[in-house]
Amino acid sequence: MLDLRLPSGLFFVILGAIVLAVGLVQPDLRAPLMDVNVNLYSGVAMLLFGGFLLLMARRAARK
Amino acid sequence: MKLAAVDYVILAVYFAFVIGIGWMLRKRMSTSGDFLLSGRSIPVWITSLAFIAANLGAQELIGMAASGAKYGIMTAHFYWVGAIPAIVFMGLFMMPFYYGSKARSVPEYLKLRFDEKTRGFNALTFAVMTVFSSGISMYALGLLLHLVLGWDFNISVLASAAIVLAYTYLGGLTSAIYNEVLQFFLIVAGFAPLAILSCERAGGWQGIVSRLPANMTHSWHYMGNASDNPMGVEVFGMVAGLGFVLSFGYWCTNFLVVQRAMAAENMSAARRTPLIGAIPKMFLPFIVILPGIAAVALAHMTGAGGAHLYELPTKLVDGVVVKDYDQVLTTLMSKFYPAGLLGVGLTGLMASFMSGMAGNVTAFNTVFTYDIYQSYIKKDAPDSHYLMVGKMTTIVGVLLSIGAAYVATMYNNIMDLLQLVFGFVNAPLFGTFLLGMFWKRSTGHGAFWGLLSGTSAAFLTWALTVAEGKGGIFGSLHTFPSTMAQNFWIAIMAFVTCVVITTVVSLATTPRPDREMEGLVYGLTKIRHEEGVKWYQRPALLAVIVLVLVIVLNIWFA
């Protein structure tokens, strides 16, 4: 059976990398009511979440 | 709102993943049971999140933010009163019968417990309802995407339907459930930042409380009198109508959600599915409702130059400008999300739409294949035939949903009416199940006539009362302060009628022998104690934790 943590982990790693890249390349990008680089923080958060899922999948596969 | 290239890339990555998951599961679909029931083999953390996500459609996301802006924190009652208690009840007391009876669907349980006509009535109304509700949400999404992004209505409706069709056709229920979990994560990733940012900008919860009328930031305090609170509902109508009849009717008997728990790998996992799902469910208001409440506070605040930080969106209705609360969520996104995160938020919205639609389609094809086709059209075919029918029904279900979406564009008022009619059908159902599962004397004739009379009672209550100018086609015996109060009371009347008629007719008809009902009724079923299950996996303990948490939340925001 397909371990769902694998594709969803991969998805969030890719998503996080894209958003983080935007935060790094265009650090001055802002929305009307937002004055921090929100792409940077949420990119990192999504990357960590994806990495966590992949780690769990790998641990389960080793058993 | 304008999207950047990166936002489209994110959307494309997401589409590739949902179809990819369906593609990877396609080889496992060798029997109708694999396709329609997931072969009862899914791990519990996945079924739990799918249980919540199948209900979290785009209409809920848009509607909860809208209600947050309109009614304030009282909207959380739809979760803390109108969902959690029913979910706990279903896991603890009803799942043993659903899962243990080996029924493949909710209508099939009715057939095993009562008789053919009760199943037929439930299967048909359910099939029609699922098609129309997925059509209506498709319509709502198409309209919103057109309004906000200028996308073509036809293309967005057809493309999103095609993607849902692709992954449900390839991987059946398993694919729908797997994707629902991915979609749930994405909804949280896409909307949690909005909740945090908008709340922060409005000065935190204290800042919101200081800017809003008090009856929008207290969920219970102003419920003594219907005229004191923005919903126009009093405590009894709320607790009995929403908290008891409507929510138990939905969460305990709607096959769309019950199906997720029935796909779990064993009885213990099936019972834990709703209980574990209840935990994220009770915290969802902070993601889906809070932005709506914060939006109202922002609309009261002024920035540099004296301009308001945010204006509540409006629309023209018959030449009059009124608030368009349905646009609160998307306009707020455009205020807080730069390119990049905006793509994530928009993808989250698409994900919620897809999880809702796939939930409807996978419930529809199971009920149609087993409860309508196999029961009334072709009884004794080999399983491969039903697998084929299940796959074809998936296509037909999507096509019918698209059709329903277009019916909605042409006759907007008919959709209002249909949703009302569905309410009539659903409201008495919990009465039937309650008596069926816990009173062995109730009979098939009792159940059928109880359901029918409960539905009629709902219709009569609507036809004889008026709220906000609606209902009352036969005259007006009572005027409700709001349509919501009217809905709650319709549900209460339907439930009481159903229970009374079922009881009376059951006592007047011959009971079924006990031995035929083993495993279907409380008292005739040995509910095996959780042998070999670790203490922290026991359903009763989980239920207590969930209930304590939800009571704390209710008191906190009272």
Image (tube, coloured by chain):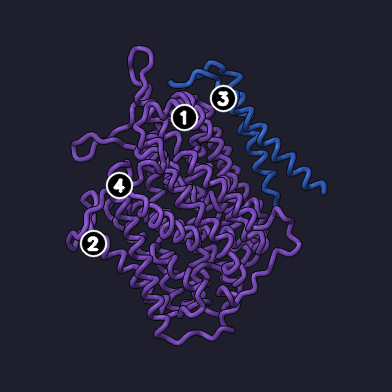
Figure colour of chain A: blue
Q: Residues within 10 Å of mark 4 (few under 14, many from 20)?
A: some
Closer mark to the observer between disc 3 and disc 2: 2
Query: Which quarter of the rendering shows the C terminus of chain B?
Result: top left
Give the alpha-carbon distance from disc 1 to disc 2, as whole Å. Answer: 42 Å
**Comparing labels 3 and 1, the label whose residue is closer to the camera:** 1
Frontmost residue, B214 versus B298: B214
Q: From the top left corner, tell me how far across and down residue B370 is, in percent.
A: 52, 71
x 58%, y 75%: residue: B523
Q: Which amino acid does the dot numbered 2 rest on?
A: Ala
- Of tags 3 and 4, the one toward the viewer is 4
The chain to which mark 2 is attached is B
Mark 3 sits on what residue? A39
Chain with colour purple in the figure: B
Instruction: Please provide percent x and percent y for residue B540.
Output: 63, 58
**Mark closer to the observer (4, 2):** 4
Query: Which numbered disc, 1 or 4, marks the residue closer to the eye?
Result: 4
Q: Amino acid at mark 4?
A: Ala
Residue under label 4: B226
Calculate the distance from the C-alpha at mark 3 to the C-alpha at mark 4.
44 Å
